[in-house]
Amino acid sequence: MFRRGELKLLTLHLIAEEPRHGYDLIRQIDPTLTLMAEMDLISEAVDGDGKKIYSITEAGSARLAEDEADIAEILARLEGVSKMGEASDGASVRRAMHNLKSA
């Protein structure tokens, strides 16, 4: 789904939209969050509930601006995948399974 470096860009984009808790992002991206914090693309703080919350830094905003076309392409690709899922209601798969069972 993602080419090298795209997950980092997408994560940065999501944090730029609004500050997020780590749980709001996918657990598997924790190493990416750590790397982005070390690169000063995001900052990490603790909210009133004791949960980590990530915010974009000036360096992160500049990086997003540099890679704006890449972000747009990634989001378009994800939108396409989402639309494919919506277009498939599963009826044809159920029919095929029923036909296979009957055969």
Image (cartoon, grey):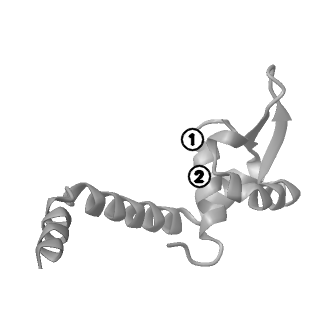
Q: Which residue is mark 1?
A: 17
Locate the C terminus by quadrant.
bottom left
Q: Nearer the viewer, residue 16 or 63?
A: 16
Instruction: State the residue in front, 54 or 30.
Output: 30
Residue marked by disc 2: 13
Which residue is found at the position 29% from the left and 59% from the top?
85
Work out whether 96 lies above or below 47.
below
Disc 1 from disc 2: Cα separation: 6 Å
Q: Which residue is found at the position 83% from the left and 56% from the top?
A: 34
Do the numbered discs 1 and 2 sit on residues whose CB atoms are within 8 Å? yes
Instruction: Give coordinates of residue 54: x percent, y percent.
Output: 75, 41
Q: Position of residue 17 (x, y in %)?
A: 57, 41
On the rendered structure, is 41 left or right of 14?
right
The location of residue 96, given as percent across then percent down, is: 15, 71
Q: Position of residue 9 (x, y in %)?
A: 62, 62
Disc on res. 59 = none
Q: Amino acid at mark 2?
A: His
